[in-house]
Structure formats: structure tokens, C-alpha cells
Amino acid sequence: MKKRRTVAILGTGMAGATAARMLADAGLTVQVFDKGRAVGGRMATRRSASLQFDHGAQFMRSRGSVLAARLAAWEQRGIVAPWVGAERWVGVPDMTAPIRDLLAGLSVRSATTITRIRRDDGAWYLDDAGGGVHGPFGAVAITFPAPQTAALLDGSGYALTDVERASYAPCWSVMVAAEGGPTGDLIEPREDPVGLIALDASKPGRPEGVRLTIHATADWSRRHLEEPRETITASLIEAAARHLRVALRPTHVEAHRWRYAQVETALDVASLYDPALGLGAAGDWCLGARIEAAHDSGAALARTIAADLNGAA
């Protein structure tokens, strides 16, 4: 029986958005699902009233030609711009801008948590937390962090090789708006408890004002992962003030805990796919701890699925 030329993409980070765009460009029908209220995954921007913070990934770098070409095209269209030198790129006006561009015109269901995937009569169906059922699909591409991918597969009664071997470091991220305070762009102490401090207003296309995103180091985040947010914010703001050599007078403070922030153990494969099932997975955990790795993994999975569903040799 000819395979259905429809694909469910789970996750709207760089891997999922790249896969979705390439599959759609290959002529397949794509439906994208994400549990978050907004797209982007760890390429995230938090807004509170008139404030905004890039509280996930701070910038992108390209080592290979594929993402470099996409970044060049995005720069021409004003979707990205260089920051802190030519090697670092940021989305404009926020880090989710490249993701929104990749997903433009595609069917995206946000705030939809997929709890189970199941096969029936050669097709895939998805069950969500609200009792909804989605399908049929000819293939499913999961682009969650590896632990979440493994949990969904296990709970659904399926497996893909070595997913459970990939591992992540956590990260506490603290967002601070302040009166007065530092100028500059990015410092990276990489000294417990502070991994980096980014000044949001220094990025192209951002509003003015003193807004800092403080990322804790992986080791410190791991040791303090379950502590109250008030304790985390106090510790990181105090440490950031020492590194910046200024007295911070916060007017707004919030924290976000990233349980799966940065890949520590990658699989060293481009993506995973079982052609007998039409089931695949992609993410930075396949290739390494970089946005470019997520992009390239999503692209690799898209090429594999397109060849399968389009009947290519």
C-alpha cells in the first residue's frame, strides 16, 4: 500500500522547524505539534508587559555551509543579525524569529501535549493530553530533547536505537530588569555559579533598557536544581553583580529552570529513522551541543522521510 504523504512533527525547536520546512518544501503535508504556548523550544523569548528576555539560547554559530547559507539568507531579510562579532548571530527582534520564519504558512498546534503515539492499519495517530486524536500520518518525527523522546517512545511501546544514551546538563536562567546598572553585551565567566551574562538591549532590534539574562553553570544548576526560585535568583543576581562590578537594583526578576539545556553526550549520528514504522527522531542530541547540530539533524531526518514517503530510491 502506498504510504500516506503526511508527517507529524513533534516539537518546534530548531530541529523540528527545520524538518517541517524541508518536508513541506518536498511536497509533503506537515502538521506540527508543541506543548508550549509559543514556538522555539530552547530558542526562547520571555515577555512580561513591556519587557522581553532571550532566556534560552543566546546566539547561533555556523561551522558548516548549510546553516551558514540559511543565516546569510535570513540576514538579507532582516530575520537575523550579527552580535558580539561576526561569528555570533541572533534572531531579530528575538531569538524565536528564525523559527517563526521556518514555520510560516505551516499548520502548527501550540499548547498541545502529545502523550502517546500509536499505529493502526499502517498509519500513525497521536493522542493528546486533552483527549484529542490526530492523524492519520504516514510518518512521525519526534524532535524533543532525548529524555522526553525516550519517555514518549517507551510509554507508547516503541523504541529507536540509543535514544536513552544521550544526556543533558540542566541550566537555571534568571531574567533581571534593573534601574541603571551595566553596559556592554556578553560576558562569560564560566565560574560557579555564573556561566554567562547577556545584556539584551545590546542585541540588534531589541528595546532599550537594562535587561540581563544570567545563565548558571551546568554543575551549579545540577546541584541546585530543586531549590526555590527565590534562592536561585538571589544567588545568581549577587554573583552577577560581582562579575559586572556594579550594584544591581532590580525592578523585575524571574527564573526559568531548563532541565535539558545543553547536550553532554551526543549519539554522533545525524538522525534516527525506522523505515518499517515511519518513525524518526532528531535533535542536537544526535550531533552535539549547538543550534547548528539541531538544524542539521532536523534536515537529515527530513531528507530521509521525504525519500521514504515520496518513494525515492
Image (spheres, helix red, strand yellow):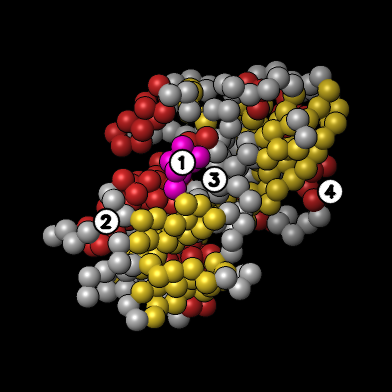
Q: Residue furthest left?
A: 313
Q: Name the amino acid, label 4.
A: Glu
- Residue on which disc 2 sits: 306
Q: Could you give the CA–CA distance between mark 1 and mark 4, rounded to whole angstroms?
A: 38 Å
Q: Could you give the CA–CA distance between mark 2 and mark 4, rounded to whole angstroms?
A: 48 Å
For the N terminus, the quadrant is bottom left
The magenta segment: 99-106
For the C terminus, the quadrant is bottom left
**234 relative position to 286: left or right:** right
Can you say whether 168 is above or below 152 in the image? above
| Disc with the residue nearer the chain's start (1 vs 4) | 1
> Whole-percent x and y of residue 176?
76, 34
> Whole-percent x and y of residue 293?
39, 46
Say which of 77 and 82 sits in front. Answer: 77
Say which of 57 and 262 sits in front. Answer: 57
Task: From the image, state whether disc 2 or disc 4 is nearer to you.
Answer: 2
> Which of the 4 quarters of the picture holds residue 206?
top right
- Residue on which disc 1 sits: 104
Q: Name the amino acid, label 1.
A: Ala
| Disc with the residue nearer the chain's start (3 vs 2) | 3
Q: Name the amino acid, label 3.
A: Gly
Task: From the image, state whether disc 3 or disc 2 is nearer to you.
Answer: 2
Q: Which mark is residue 230?
A: 4
Mark 4 nearby-residue class (10 Å; few <14, some 14–19, many ≥20):
few
| Disc with the residue nearer the chain's start (3 vs 4) | 3
**77 relative position to 274: left or right:** right
| Disc with the residue nearer the chain's start (3 vs 1) | 3
Q: Could you give the CA–CA distance between mark 2 and mark 1, rounded to whole angstroms?
A: 19 Å
Q: Secondary structure at mark 4?
A: helix
Q: Could you give the CA–CA distance between mark 3 and mark 2, rounded to whole angstroms?
A: 23 Å
Can you say whether 2 is above or below 7 in the image? below
- Residue on which disc 3 sits: 40
